[in-house]
Each structure stands twice: as structure tokens, then as C-alpha cells.
Image (cartoon, grey):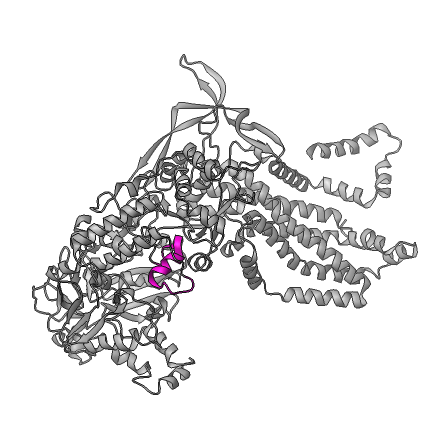
Amino acid sequence: MQLDRRMFLLGSTALAGSLMAPVAFGQSATPVESDSLRADVEAGNLPPINDRLPENPLVVTPRERAGKQGGDWNHALVGGGSLSMMFRYQAYEPLVRFTPDWSGVTPNVAESYEVNDDATEYTFHLRKGMKWSDGAPFTTADIQFWYEDIFLDENVAMGAQPFWYSGGKVGQLTVVDETTFKVTFAEPNGFFVQQLAWANQDQTVRAPKHYLSKFHIKYNPDADKLARERGMESWIALFQNESGLAEDNTYFQNGNRPTLTAWMFDVAPGESTERVISVRNPYYFKIDTEGTQLPYFDRIVYQMVADPEVLLLKTLQGEVDMMDQYIATPTNRPVLFDGQESGDYHFYTLKETAANAMVFQLNLNHTDPFKNELFNTRSFREAMSIAINRQALIDSVFVGQSTPAQPSIIESDPLYVERLAKQHVEYDPEGANAILDELLPEKDDDGYRLDRNGKRLTIIFEIDQARPTFIDMFQLAVPMFQKVGLDVQIRTMDRSLWETRVRNGREFDATAHQFGANSGIAAMLDARYFVPHTSNSLYAQGWSLYFSEPDNPDAIEPPEEIKAIQERYKTLLQTGDQTQQAEIMREILNTAADQFLVFGVCHLPDGYGVVKNAMVNTMDTMPNSFGWPTPAPSMPEQFFKA
Amino acid sequence: MTAMHSTAQFHDEAGPAVTPLKPTGGREEIAVAGQWTLIWHKFARNKLAVFSAAIIVLLYLIAAFAEFLAPGDPSASRPQYTYAPPQPIGWFVESEDGERRFQPHVKGYTVEVDPASYRRTFVPDDEQIVPIGFFVEGTPYRLWGLFEMNTHLIGALDPTQPMYLLGTDRLGRDLLSRLIYGTRVSMSIGLVGVAMSLVLGIVLGSLSGYYGGWVDTSIQRLIEVVSAMPTIPLWLGLAAAIPLTWSPLQVYFIITLIVSLLGWTGLAREVRGRFFALKTEDFVTAARLDGSRERRLIFRHILPSLTSHILAVVTLAIPTMIIAETALSFLGIGLKPPVVSWGVLLQDAQNIRTVSSAPWLLAWPAGAVVIAVLSFNFFGDGLRDAADPYES
């Protein structure tokens, strides 16, 4: 399936969502009991299929052909620290999900939904008779439990869900009946369903009331006692531990919590250091066109691997059925390419969605007044940008497979703004020197420029050491900066130290990162490099904080032009109409080009992943993103091995 | 070294020829020879140890003259030559009329990029002759920070042309140059720490063992306190405390010093034990009765009889240090790129891509470490054997 980025924008609004029928919606198929579960049903361990499925199961049209239940999906996870990867493989079942081509959203757990004209009221219809993986009914009571006793309960405090707010007020939940509920906003909230479809954002369908309520003081007065029995201070700690909604690792380490997903844990990550095993959820709400209940795979078996090199070896030997994380780097590409025959796998294409391969970010909210003033000078950033020979970086790190570009929208997208993408990418050390001679005329004996106090100006980029391509690019870029008299250095550090110093600190000089988004709806939702609005806008943490919490003592009031772009972005988030959305976004991108807050290297060339030849119904081309949690929206429930 | 060795032999042989009437002259010489002369004679007979010593000297010469010996700048990269394989040196070129003439050269590459596999394929191009020579002009440098020079021992006559005798790494940097520059860091900084541990261990151990009493008690308690110090939390604290403006090399230097401040305790204990055993020996009593002062007793009489032991400890510590260079990198305080050292080169090469398609990146740095470590070990063995008074 070819990914069409224009479609991406076309289907991007809430209004379009209600009009769009899901691929299989309206199709029907008669559920057939599968061979593998028949024995259990006959022995009375499991109700028959029609009692397990909702009245109106979601009928999935298999991508190539229908399969049979059975088999293991051989998978792997690296280390213990990255369980959020599981959203990609077995935990993406929101109310509405992104379509496989990311052209829009389609009902999933919700049977259907409607939006009113000004995007202030969303009505969702659940599936009648739908059940959690332990057989308990899934109804609007579960949604209400999440809303009242988790989301709005100050004790539980599950972390922010900003998209539930509009005009500074939280959306109101109204339960109509057992299967219908409404969310009403004070002001338009144009991206609500897209936000629900974003990976790891829809918590409404992840809080089984019948299981979690016994840990909540409101429902169980003895919850504190229960907590102390388990060695915890209060029911809050226990509840957070059991629900896991605040922290991904906690979420996945609890294998007892019922779920709506296709597979549920048999051996959860907390229980074994060698392998994690997920087994079929017999109550899963999807069937294929022939009536076979999904998923096809009986189990997902994750090997826990110590480091990426071991995973690479296992993949080369054909022990992993599908993999695009950890090992699918440009460096490993020749190795994996050569191993295709012996490993019995082939490549698929990943369309990169990051705004840039690497974004240089000077700290625009620096505590040092001289550096703060300098970094906030646009011509200084321009000088640094044109001091970089991007083609050299591309040639060595990406084997020449890209062209220089700033963090921006890609050319094939309707939102493409050429100035944003291509300004200041020409390699021009003389030009850089000319600008710098104005700003920092004094030099020391070694040819490095001096600051106001006559001390050598040193700019240290702090980098997460787990990003080898960044380190490679910096090894090439540092001499280029030195050539124009800037004493640029890099320090690599462990991720946790980096988080402390950069994401939560104000004293760092500069850093580099990637992500963000290069097209359509994703760029509107994650505009981190165009508007400082999230903690991911590492270059201006203070301004970003001002966007969401202007009263926070750490927030820094930005200059007028930044405030203006932040206001426009707020307007964008409230807009439901797609033409208007595109118009406002284009305006924002043009302003971002004027401001030129960050600079980059190039857009990432297409990535790749490997999939065993025996796997059926996988996609040949898909986006690489965490929001569209590759490969979950391509529907792993209908994967099988021939 | 080898030259000295043959001189010694010549001397041995020449002795009897010049003074045939005194065939025992050599032995008399030995009988009156001082301890160091004896050690030297014994050492010189151990060919392996002498050879190792020569290699160590060579390595230090390489470290000292890295700028001159390296064909290029270790951090200069050429994107079009990533993972280029080593080029063998050819000695003769055949001109168009079929005449062979002497011209050291390497062959250029034809490079093809395969977008499917993301690989540059290098095929030696017989047409593309890159003439090379000795004492060529190339990248300018400042030897020891003093002399502006641009002469390199070996290099392409035209510095813009590729000459990668040991191949290149993933960023297209010359491995030979990196290896030569790496020698400097690997053979120096880590060893400063070893030397400091050694001095501290010997001095404090000797004092403790020789004087006994309250000196001994306080030094031993100090040792216990130091050994009880948990190291990982200490390094964690240091990693946070060291200012970010320090270069990785400075950080590593400080860390090795601190490690050495913690690492002397084992040696001190051993030295103390030996002192206890030796200080009541007859030769010590004799020396004391001869009026030797304490300093002379410790350093001239007792300590030399421990030399073999100390040498063994040191020669084992040095290779550990070279290999452990990068061990603390996870805390951000070990050696890391852009510093060039053997440990860093080895760490860069520890991946399947390198093993499968660029083995030279692993082989050469590993070879360098093995050679250095073996040389130190054999050299240490030789010294110990030579210094051991108890062996015949």
C-alpha cells in the first residue's frame, strides 16, 4: 500500500472523521468458532463465540487474504527500559484508530462517533456486549470511572492529557446510556479524535472499573489496608501501580489487569527477564471477513535481549519475525541486506515522519545573559547554520541519500513552505565568518572568538549518548564550526543525565534532537520546532511552559513575536475546519521561517524494517512514527505466517 | 636496544681475546659488580624481554612523534570514503610503453553507492595510481605545540588523494592516523594513574612495615577506610560534580588520578608484609650496624629485594588500564569520541557491521593493544627475573 501524504491532510479533521466509513464498517460476517478454542468451549471453560463477541464485532478485511488462528509471532525487546515499545505491537486499541495509510481515523473500540459542526460536542457509541479480556462487560461505566475517579481525581493524578481541555476548561463527560457517551467542550477542540488515536493517549479504554475499583478508596474503604499489605504507603501508590496509566513501564509490568487488546500477558515483563509471552484474548472484538475471530497469532513471544547487537544477530538468523526498531539503522543496512537469504526475510519501507534528521537547538532561554542574548540573535543562528557543510554529513551518515533541509514540512506535502525548508542551508563559511565578525569580532591566539568579557566563547552541545548518528554527525560538524572561530564542543551523556540537564534544566548551552513531524496532521499536533509549545521544544523550555502554564514560576514570558505565534497555534488547535486548519498552519510555518529558531541537517531518508518472508498481511510501506505507532495501525491482529 | 645487546656480547667475547692471561676477569668483574649491573646483565640475556623493551620504546616514540608519523589528521573525514578497505602498497608502476619503474604507490578506488543496501562498494582501480613517498608535505601541524611543520613520514604526494594503508572508519577517517594518535593517549594518561598508585603504595607500605607501632596502625586504618569507599557512587558523584567545560581528556586524567588514590592499598599491604619479614633479616641488621640511616636502609637495602614483586604488580596493572579506558564511559567520565585512543577505537568497532564488513577496524586496534600488553608483560617478566636475587 502506497502511503499518500496528501490523503494524510485530507482526512485529518474531526468532521471528515464522522463522514468516513471505516474500511470494513457495514460489512458483516458470521462468527465461526475456531478449532483452537473449540475444546475449551466444549469443556465449559469459555463461553461460545457469540457470547464472547460484541453484538456488532468489528469486521476486519485482511490486507491480502484471510488466515487461520495459530502460530507464534516471534518478537524481541531490548533491555528492560523500553516497554513503551509495546504500544507498537500489542497495546494500540483506542476508541478510534489511525487508518493504515494515516489518512485519517476510523472507529475502533467505538462502533461509531459523531461530531457537531463547531467541534464542541463529540458523541461516541460503544459496541453492545463488548467484554474485557476476563469476560466482564465493557460499558460507559468504565469510561465514567476513568473520567471521574482517575482523570479528575486529584489524588490519583495520572499526568496531563492536554487535549481534553479547550478554552482552558476540561471537556465534560455525559453518559447517555450503557453504550453512548458525549464529551462537550467549552470551545471548539478540532483535533480531539486525532488526539485519541495518537499512541498511548487514549486512556479511556484502559481502565477496567471492575478490576481497578477495588484499589480505589472511593469504592473500597479498605484500600489503604490492602496497600499496606502489599508494602505500599497508601492506596494512591497501590492504585497508580495497578492502573499504570502514569508510567508506561508500570503499565506493562502488570499482567493481571484485564484489557481490550488482541493479546494479553501470560508472562508479563516484570515476571521474567528472559521472555515475555502474550496470549490471545478470547474476548477480542474483531473478526475477519470469513468470521474467524482475530487475532490470528496465538501468542506473541518477546525475547528480552540485552543489547541491539544481540538483536541484530538474532534477526540475521531469522529468529525475529518483524523488526524496525533498535537495529534498522543506516549503519546496519548492508549487514541486514546481505542476510536476507539466510535469515529468510525481506525489507519493507518506513516513511520517516521526523521534521529533520538532527535539529541543532541553542538554548534560547539560557540563564547566562550574554549567551542568551547571542543565541536569541537570528543572524548568529544563521551564521551557525551556513557554517555546516550538510552534504558532507549526508554523504557520510546517510550514504548521500538525502538533500540539505532545515526542520520543516517535506516537499510532497501540501503544507510545504520552501523558505522554511531551504533557507540558510547553503554551505558558506565566508558568509558565516562575515556575520560572526560583526557579532563577535575579537579572537584569541588560537583563532576562537571571544565573548564580551574577553573569554573564549565555548558552546557545548549536550547529547544523549544512545544516539550514534548524532554523535557521528557532530564529529563532522564540530570542525566546521571551529573553522569559523566558534569553539563548539560536544558532551555525550547517559539519557537520564541528559533528561535532567536538558529537558529539566536551563543552564545548558545547546543540544540536538530529532522527531517533531514533517507533514499533515502530525505536524499540526506536534509543532515543536515551529512553535515553542511543549517540553519537547528543548530550545525554549521557559517559553513552552508559558504556553501551557503562564503562571508557573519557571515559565519565561516570551517576546511579542513568539507570543503571537503561540496564540496562532492555540487558535489552530481550536479549529475544526480543515481548510482553515491548513491556512493557519501555513501562516505559522511562514512565521517560523521568519523566526528561524532552530536549524537542522536534512530530512531523514526512507528507513526500513525487516519482516520474515512467511509473514502475511503486513504492509510494504508505512510511516515511521510513535504517534502512528509503527506497525500497530497496520493491524497486527490480522498478521499470520503462511 | 638491540645494538646495546650486541655491544654487551662483544664485550664478553672481547674480554678473553684482549687479556688471555686472565680468563677469569669477567667473573671477577661480576663479583664486584653492583646490583644494577647484575640486573642489567641478567636482563640483557633474556632476548624476549629485550625485544619487548624495544617495542615499548618504539611505542613511546610513536606517541611522541604522532603528528609526524601519522599520514593525516585523525579527525579529518572524507564522506566519500566511508568504510574504505586498506590499500596495499605497490612498488613498481608500468608506464604506457611497458617500462617498469620504481614508484611506491597505492591504487585509488572506484566507488559505487548501492541505495538498496546503503553501501559504498570499493573496487581498486588499476588506472588510478596514487604515488606515495616519504617525508612528504601534508596537513600542517605543530609538533609538541612548538614547531610549525607539515612534513609527514609517509603520505600521498598529492595530499588530496586517498591513501588509507589501514582503511577508513565509518566516517571516512584514516585508521592509521587514528591508531598512531591513539597511541599517545593510551600509552600515557592511564599510566600516570598506575605510576601514582605505585609510588603511594610503596612509600606508605614501606613506612608502615618498617616503623610499625602507631605509624603502622594509622596507615593500616587509613587503608581500611580507603578500601571501604564504594567506588561506583563516588564516580557517579564525580560525574555530576566535574564541570562540563572540561574536555573529556582532562576529565579522564582526573578520574585516573582519583582511581589511583583509591587503588594503592593492595600494593601497600603487600609491601608492608614483606617489610615485616625482611626488616629482621641479617643483611638489614648488618647495614644498620654499619651506620646506615633509615632512609638508606629502606630504599637501598630492603626495597630492592622487593623489586620483582612490585614489577609484577605494575606490569599487570598497565594492560588493565588500557583496556579499561572506556569502561567508565557510561557515566560520561571514560574516554569517548572525539578523543582518539585505542580503547575508543575498539569500542567503535564492537558491532556486527564492523565485524562483517570492515574487520580492519577491529583487527588493527586490537592488535595494537595485544602487542602493547604482551610487551609490557614480557618486559616485566624479564625485569622481575633479572631483579630476583633468589633465582640462579
Left or right of B219 in this view: B359? left
Q: Residue furthest right?
A: B290
Give the residue displayed 77% in from the left and 49% down from the top. Answer: B392
Quadrant the C terminus of chain A occupies: bottom left
Quick check: A318 above or below B132?
below
Location of residue A311 by image quarter: bottom left
Q: Residue furthest front?
A: A560
Residue A549 belongs to the span the image colors magenta:
yes
Front residue (pair A296, A171): A171
Left or right of B253 in this view: A96? left
Front residue (pair B300, A400): A400
Give the residue displayed 82% in from the left and 51% down from the top. Answer: B300
Q: How many marks?
A: 0
At which x and y percent is residue A54?
13, 73
At which x and y percent is residue A291?
10, 66
Q: Is residue A331 visible?
A: no
Location of residue B371 by image quarter: top right
Front residue (pair B109, B227): B227
Residue B246 belongs to the span the image colors magenta:
no
Quick check: A201 above or below A328?
below
Left or right of B30 in this view: B49? left
Q: Residue furthest bottom?
A: A221
- The stretch in magenta equals A534-554
Front residue (pair A617, A598): A598
Quick check: B347 above or below A306?
above
Q: Is residue A81 visible?
A: yes
Q: Residue furthest top?
A: B97
Location of residue A257 by image quarter: bottom left
